[in-house]
Image (spheres, rainbow, N blue to C red):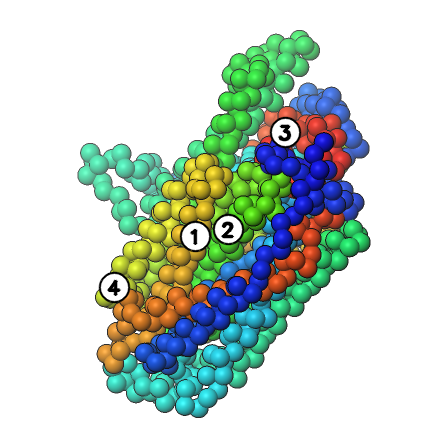
Amino acid sequence: MSAHPDSAAVGAPAVLAEVKPAVLPRPVLVANNRNYTWITDKICSLIEGPTPTWWWVCFIVAIFVASFTIAGLTYLVGTGVGVWGHRSPVNWAWDIVNFVFWIGIGHAGTLISAILCLLRQKWRTSINRAAEAMTIFAVACAGLFPLFHVGRVWMAWYLFPISNANAIWQNFRSPLEWDVFAVSTYGTVSVCFWYVGLIPDLAVLRDRFTLAGHNLRAWLYGLFAMGWRGSNRHWRNYEMAYLILAGISTPLVLSVHTIVSFDFAVSLLPGWHTTIFPPYFVAGAIFSGFGMVLTLMLPLRAIYHLEDLITQYHIDNICKITLATGTMVGYAYAMEFFIAWYGSNPYEGFAFINRAFGNYAWAYWIMITCNVITPQFFWFKAVRQNTTLVWVLSIFVNVGMWFERFVIIVTSLARDFLPSSWGYYSPSIVEIFTFFGTFGVFSTLFLLFIRFLPIMPMAEIKAVTQQADPHGGGDRH
Amino acid sequence: MSAPVPPPPAPRSDQALYVGLAGIATTGFGLMFSPLKMVAFAWLVGVMFWTAITIGMLLLVLIHHIFDASWSTIIRRQYEHWLSAFKWLALLFLPLLVLSWMPRHSGLVWSWMDPATPLPGGHGTVGTDVLYVKKSAFLNLNLFTIATIAFFAVWVFLSCKLRKHSFAQDADGDAVWTLKNRWWAAAGIPLAALSLTFASILWVKSLEYHWFSTMYGVWFFSNCVRGALSMGVLMMLWLYHRGDYAGLLNRNHLHSIGQLVFAFTVFWGYVSFSQYFLIWNANIPEETFWYNLREQGDWYWVGMLILFGHFFVPFLYLLSYKHKVVHAWIRPIVIWVLALIFVDICYNILPAIKDARGDPLPFLSLTLLWSLTAVIGVGGICVWAYLRSFPTTKLIPIRDPRIAECLVYHESSHE
């Protein structure tokens, strides 16, 4: 046993002679000892092969579903925001619920790419590309809602501070204005991060299409590969760029959902104004994002037979993060309820009693069941190893997190300080269709992604194989 | 090939005990110059400071196991030794509990314990305060006592389990001990989170029981972990310069723990800013009074010190790689962070001592002196407990499944 060279300034300490680690091998990240060629062939074959029938079926369905959003928004623009079901006192409802829901889903991509990268979690490599794509598509879906809620969508550019010449002054004290900056920055950096990661893989596809004689495809992939040759200098710059983007993205993950939480927490409304909102929203966003990662990756794993790349260890880890963040969300629910009582503010206390036992109690208990109880099943190994069950539970997580935003937003508004103005909000059919359609928008984009771009970073996966380990993947000394 | 270097002689623990006893005696001596109330508050500062750090170490050991981490194996054993201090911390908390049960002194620290305690400004007594009456199901002496015992029981229990399994592995090299600790880590993290949250509410936040904030437990957690990481750096450096860690510790270990000190500096800033900002922005008197009190007299400058000293200084300082790995650079900043945790705890506890008009007594006072002696006293006992445990096992967990990875740890290994 020898220690690291940095520490070799003095003689080896006697305790080193006694070091004899117990045997507890780390799980492999690429099963069946697959070699580099197999990894390249496997991932590229998803793009190079003929388009599967199932893909066309899903794509047509997705386009059809997406048309609901297009139709809903066209009708809204042509008629007015009144076609949504917002009425006083609930002047904010599905629009902001859907916005926060989709933004939250995007967070897992950045967490996996950036934070797990900084934490040196190697297992992220099999899922980070798809999760990053998910981030971008989710942000696109999220952005639709506030964009169209402004009413005159063609004036939305007034939100940016470029229109002072028109004597339009943005309210920089409004967290909704902060959202504009937070979300647009987040979207931009996420696209950059995703694209930078894609460059080496696009070059691989360029080279393979060139060899296969597909000149147009080779040219297109080559265009976006930006002349990548895989030289030492390229890799060095790439690694540095990736690390810098990871560093930038990490505070962005926190800032975006923190500012989303400020949309509510800076107000005085009972149920909204509470100090734990920022970290609670961030934990909830990661929770929902990982739920969506499971929802998307498990079918992909089964259809494309990716079991050697997305191993049981990966699923275990995602389930455990879902369990941890779901429990954090549960902690926040409990703390909110407890402090609503402890704070002795009758309005705050009522808001929480009303959530649990009022006219929206059904929504509250769906939320608790899906977000707090459902992830607790992930304590059990047998559950984590049953991918069908994991997939079903991940759907519950998605549903629960949508309801969390609904509960926070609608129940607080529907019964605020003045009982004479209490009301009951129900969505209009236009709202329902518009939201339903965003799943089509998201699915369309995701299907295009898995058909035309490598869904996993080949180079990164190769770096975590046993062959890439100079110590042979053994006890590493 | 050179002969192995034998370890230096085990450090003496009795000196730490003497320092601790001297600190405790000096704090007790404070009763000759200050009222019992001031000394009791100072004692709470001392106990809270070290309890926070020890909870942080417990959390770091739990997190180490749940992540199946490798690099932190080198410092984990030292944390395990330090966890033996929990039982002594429970004992050191006892005077506050005994004081609470003494009819004459009940309500001295936690005013809600005595219904006869007058409210500031002549607004009746605690017993007639509607806000207290509403909270009395939670804020009562019986529950306080049971909860305090339960908190320490959880921490002592988890510590004993983690220590026992880790030490047993040194002897037989069985991987099952690692798996057992991993299981206890999964179960222990929620327990530790809940206990530290309610400990911070009952022991600190309830000092001004009108005030409330859902973020409080998270704030306390951030300070616990910052303190534990800073102490971890100090222990690493001490053991290196003593000769124990020479040949074991490398700059990557220091860089990784330095990065965590940096990360938790940001986290603390995030949590503290969020709490302050949301209360400031809402401007509701029921919440703002807590900060308003802390803008009076010299507490304003303490607030500024915390803002700049507890966030901006370590944040900017720790951006540099060199400042995280060069011993002469990282040592002062972790000492600074520990000092600021002390100030932060003072900021949360001491303004609860009010004059007849309800204004907080100044920060620069004899109470601060007794708080410092209490920190030295309780700290001396904790160090003594650590040093007593230190020679009972191997310096590092020699049979841990990840110890080999840890000793050759280099950051490009992405472990």
> What distance separates the C-alpha of mark 3 from that of mark 1?
39 Å
What is the chain letter for disc 2? B
Question: On the rendered image, what quadrant is the N terminus of chain B found in?
Answer: top right
Residue holding disc 1: B335
User: Separation of disc 2 and disc 1 at Cα?
Assistant: 8 Å
Q: Are marks 2 and 1 in contact (CB under 8 Å)?
A: yes
> Which mark is first along the chain, 1 or 2?
2
Q: Residue flagged by tag 1: what amino acid is it?
A: Ile
Q: Nearer the viewer, mark 4 or mark 1?
A: 1
Q: Secondary structure at mark 2?
A: helix
Q: Is residue B305 above or below residue B102?
A: above
Mark 4 lies on residue: B298
Task: Give the quadrant of the C terminus of chain B.
Answer: top right
Instruction: Give the SS element for disc 3.
Output: helix
Up-down: is A89 above or below A344? above
> Can you identify the residue that label 2 sits on?
B234
Toward which corner of the image does residue A43 lie, by quadrant? top right
Residue, disc 3: A460
